[in-house]
Image (cartoon, grey):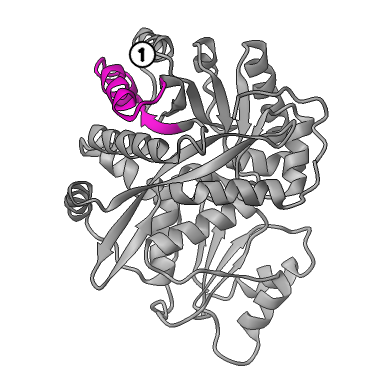
Amino acid sequence: MPFEATHGDSIPLRRAAARPDPGGELLAVLRSPALMALVQETLHRIGADPARPVAPEEATARLVGPGRPPMGLLCEAQPEERGWGALHAAAQDPFSPTRVLLLDSALAGNVAALTAALRRITGRSDPSEADEVAALRRGLAEGEVAMRYQPIVRIADRRPVGLEGLVRWLRPDGRRAIPLGPDAFIPMAERHGLALAVARAVGRMATQDLRILRPQIALPVSINLPLEVLQRPDTVPWLGRLCRESGLRPSMLGIELTETTPVHDVPLLRRAVLRLRQAGHDLWVDDMSLEERRDTLLRFPFTGIKLDRFLVSEAPHNRRSRAELERLVGLAHARGMLVTAEGISSPALWQAMARAGVDRAQGFAVGRPLPAAAIPAWIAAWRGAGQPRWPSDGTRSGGTA
């Protein structure tokens, strides 16, 4: 069986015994909800069918039993689970037509590697980057880029306190359009000089949507800006112009720093942060994680930090992740900053974050990314769902609805 193991940037792959069966089924034996969500999102992005989650025993039966074998199998090592030993043994057969991809947490920061691996296992072709850049330019000009908003709530009292604006691209592909999340095209946009164009489009759409929601909904929205755009001296003026045109206070439009490039000029970033805060915008450090420490940024006057969803998902059962999460919460609170946990997908994760002192929660257990027009319906559903008021263990409150 062709066996592909992923570890960061290195993806050793033995030659496949057979080409992928485009009509075959893709199975997934994955423990982490965050990893499963990332896999499904990536498969959707490349135009492949979703993977079907199964237990190790069912995956083994499909590999060795009668009938058509699956096209591929996605595995996360879980030796403590019943049936894993048999599945691992079955997955070693180099002559099986099923392709096996072993996933690990290193893929959390390597979306390009995961995308390439899933393209190989599903047989989906990889368009050239030049074609994709040209398509994105057209998409920005022709209105193919849109916004979705994911709710954020305060853990102490479950009160809605904000929205994160997430950019989406409805990428034309022949007779259909493929919905793409930011991981699929934002890094490419930054590499090819489109970061500012995307940022301005995102800011314009977010402020227009906020204006439409008011006065019924008065939740602040944060948008993602890369380091390159955040540091530009003209960023504060154009954000201010958008707010004035929409009749919004700057505090209603927050900024999340998505640091995809390292900070080489610390004084330049400090000046940029001060400009934005003095103009009235809240400012957040996005994707604080175990893999890349960015403690230097905590010295700046940010409003708060957002904990990476993979760090959050690992914390309940990984001592190192839990220690890092608690360390970040302590550092942030010592500097008067709020802490938001991304990727809250269950009551268990909510409770774990509450015990760690996290202030805010964001994730599918709170709400999915939604069109602006659906936010009032989400608020009604959230307030009327009768969900238990999970214990907050004395967490700090933060933000206003």
What residue is rendered at 70% in x and 70% in y? 56
Q: Is residue 202 toward the left or the right of residue 98 in the image?
A: left
Q: Amino acid at mark 1?
A: Ala
Q: Is residue 209 visible?
A: yes
How many numbered discs, if any? 1
Q: Which residue is identified by label 1?
A: 272
Look at the image and give the residue range highlighted in magenta. Answer: 222-249
Query: Whole-percent x and y of residue 96?
Result: 53, 80
Query: Whole-percent x and y of residue 396?
Result: 73, 22
In front here: 321 or 135?
A: 135
Magenta stretch holds residue 275: no
What residue is rendered at 39% in x and 35% in y? 211
Query: Whole-percent x and y of residue 3?
Result: 52, 66
* Quadrant in the rendering for residue 121: bottom left
Residue neighbourhood size for the residue with mark 1, other residues' Cα within 10 Å, grouped as few (<14), some (14–19), many (≥20) = many
In front here: 346 or 227?
A: 346
Secondary element under disc 1, as helix, strand or loop, is helix
Is the C terminus in the top left, top right, bottom left or bottom right quadrant?
A: top right
What residue is rendered at 36% in x and 30% in y? 226
Q: Is residue 7 visible?
A: no
* Quadrant in the rendering for residue 242: top left
Above or below 264: residue 377:
below
In front here: 370 or 138?
A: 370
